[in-house]
Amino acid sequence: MTELWSGYAWPLLIILAQIMAMVVPLLVAVAYLTYAERKVIAAMQLRKGPEIVGPFGLLQPFADGLKLLFKETILPAGANRIVFLAAPILTFSLAMIAWSVIPVAEGWVIADINVGILFLFAISSLGVYGVIMAGWASNSKYPFLGALRSAAQMVSYEVSMGFVIITVLLCVGSLRLTDIVMAQQTVWFAIPLLPMFVIFFISTLAETNRAPFDLPEGESELVAGFFVEYSAMSFALFFLGEYANMILMSAMTTILFLGGWLPPLDVAPLNWIPGVVWFALKVALVLFCFLWVRATFPRFRYDQLMRLGWKVFLPFTLVWLVLTAGALVAFGWLPA
């Protein structure tokens, strides 16, 4: 009995506690990201934003969540029920699973695996399946067109994202996310690899279907894209998945280019602040840029989106990758 407790039950409880410690703050962050988005965009458009429910409108996300929770889930007559309901669950689950390898501070990670960045890249690539399933199972033309667009868009921008990640890995010599952060103790990679940082950020916008790349849900021509037939909690799960993916991509940007949990300078007052606070601040800064871009830029036309991905980003990242490799070899900077 003692062996069962110490060998299986206790480690299982610890893992469950770790998962809850990661998922609960993440869900709260997702809720308040929707609030922050509305407030930031309202401020940029000289409006007030939500301010009725609770002080300063702070309870608005919960009011919206409850409203969706108590609505009826309507299944379209010709829809494939199982796939239709599995799609939002898949999208949301993948957005949560990816956080298992994200180190928010030194040692603060559920699974510090030695192929962490590869795992993240694979999970973010799988996100497109939820969208395709939603579009196909809805048995309607608008969602299907939205799903096709989303698939093409995600595949196009993953290529350049892959090359950006390879460039960072050349400078680190490891696929472990903790090692990538520790390699930035002298200088954050955003400085020497500035063009790659910009391309990675723009690619994350396209990857998460955010403005100005929100073509799959372009309401001017596709009603609401792959969301069209969804309502109540199935819609809410898609919504949560999209915002959780935004936070995930911001965390990836922070780890790859902004030094993860490291302070900007390793000097007295700055390094007293816990790493998790630095990490949260950097993620918040990248998320603010997501919202800023949404409030500022008009939507791309579809051919412009494809042209940018294939004819601009892909050749540029390829050339920069070769230049980086050449510089590392020429100056003897290759990681041991």
Image (spheres, rainbow, N blue to C red):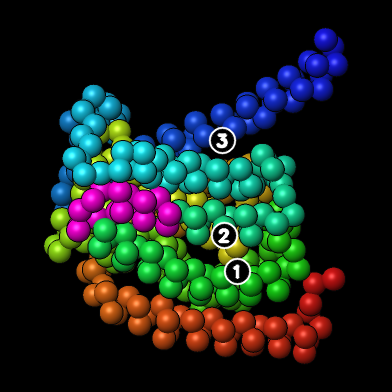
The kind of secondary structure element at disc 2 is helix
Query: What quarter of the picture does the N terminus occupy?
Result: top right
Q: Which mark is residue 22?
A: 3
Q: Vertically, is 223 above or below 197?
A: above
The kind of secondary structure element at disc 3 is helix
Please tell me which residue lies in front, 258 or 10: 10
| Tag 2: amino acid | Phe
Query: What quarter of the picture does the C terminus occupy?
Result: bottom right
Query: Residue at 71% of width from left, 88% of height from top?
Result: 326
Asked if residue 246 lies left or right of residue 262, the reply is left
Query: Residue at 48% of width from left, 41% of height from top?
Result: 93
The kind of secondary structure element at disc 1 is helix
Q: Quadrant of residue 33?
A: top left
Q: Main secondary structure of the magenta part?
A: helix
Q: How far is mark 2 from mark 3, CA to CA?
A: 20 Å
Residue 226 coordinates in the image, percent (x, y): 27, 53
